[in-house]
Amino acid sequence: MKFNVNTEIALTYLTSRKKQTLVAAAGVMFGISMFIFMQSLMKGTNDYFEKMSFTNTPHIRLFSENKVADNHMLRTFLNDASEKILVNPKQLKQSQGLTNPYGIIAQLRRNKEISGITPQVTGNVIYTSGSVELPGNIAGVDIEEENLMFDVQGNMVAGSLHDLNRVQNSILLGKGIADKLSLHVGDNITVRAGNGNLVIMRVVGIFATTVRSVDDTKSYANIARVQSIIGKDRSYVTEIKINLKDYNRANIVAREIETITGYKAEDWIKANEQLKAGFKVRAVILNSVIGVILLVAGFGIYNILNMTIYEKIKEIAILKAQGFSGRAVTSIFLQQAVFIGILGGIVGLTLGFSLTYMVSRIYIGAGSLKYLPMSFYIPHYVEALMFGILTTIAAGYFPARKASKVDPVTIIRG
């Protein structure tokens, strides 16, 4: 392959100082490989924790919020800003149930952004087995829809969730409840609601989400059975759970649903604000570390090109005396920086991928986490290569500019 004169000179300078070239490329390689590894680790862990948060939490939860009375109607009536009104706000008495829930569901199903929707009835209960009692909550659901939205089957450790629709008065228990009450599939458990209703139910399955607060308190039953236990009719629904095709639009869709229904629509971001805050903190720490690594690599390239200019100062003077412009000299040294960036970038991409793959095979075995969660996200590799090359160009620009201003007459005379 034939190169132009500037490129041939740049390659000659690089190959004549192989050790320094390799050291500079190694700095870029290390920076890029760490960029890929850290980004893969952060995205992998973020994706895992987001997935875990969706084990029981829908993208949007629609429910009747307790409202506080205000004085806006009184102020409108008085229409006099000089009047001072003393108020003692109280919560308004209202039902926890939604009005016409199945009509709302039918309306929301027409929204193309919604991928799954299911009603739920929740009630506080006391679980009893022998002389042992435990407080908890029972969720009345359509188990097939619940499974499609939250993969209940993936959390089952005993029994079958489908028996919830086949066996009368059946219940799925969290593993913590089953362990504390020494219950197994096929055993009976007594469930007492807050209104005093008491029913004996058959354990047809046991699930474990690895979230202790859930496994120690929660159970599933047929929605009609729970409505009966808490003394409500078949139209009573406490909340509607909604999943979207793109969960990142949950806050936007939630506001639209609130406008349509008049009920509170809580998106998963508001329900997991601490989780999102953790993501942002990790991102800041990660980008700071990567920035420092690439900055160090940039200084290494800067120093090497600076040394090259000092050592080749007479050759640069001769080039300029022969008619090479300052722009051509700048091009020679900038090309050296680009070649170093490309060499370090290609090796860095390979090393970063290999390191990410090896770490992804590290067995953790904690709860539902089997292996260390790593992400192989292609845009990270593109970003790493572009970031590495831009860093080397920035590091090489100042020495290149310095070389372009060399005065050949002064150097040759000196």
Image (spheres, rainbow, N blue to C red):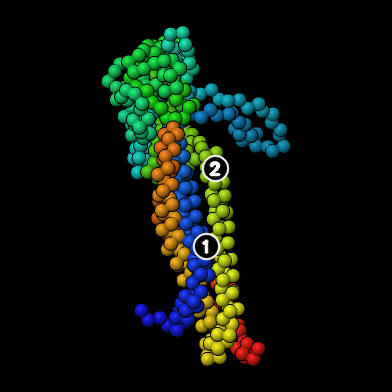
Give the residue displayed 44% in from the left and 32% down from the top: 367
Q: Quadrant of the C terminus?
A: bottom right
Residue assigned mark 2: 278
- In the displayed structure image, the side of residue 414 where residue 180 appears, left or right: left
360, above or below 334, in the image: above
> 140 or 311, which is in the foreground?
311
Quick one: SS at disc 2?
helix
> 348 or 283, which is in the foreground?
348
Dot 1 amino acid type = Gly
Give the residue displayed 56% in from the left and 53% down from the top: 289
Q: Position of residue 279 (x, y in %)?
A: 52, 45
Crowd class of label 1 (few under 14; some 14 to 19; many from 20; radius 10 Å): many
345, above or below 73, in the image: below
Dot 2 amino acid type = Gly
Give the residue displayed 43% in from the left and 15% down from the top: 181
> 166 or 289, which is in the foreground?
289
Tag of residue 27: 1
Quick one: SS at disc 1?
helix
Q: Quadrant of the N terminus?
A: bottom left
Q: Is residue 239 visible?
A: yes
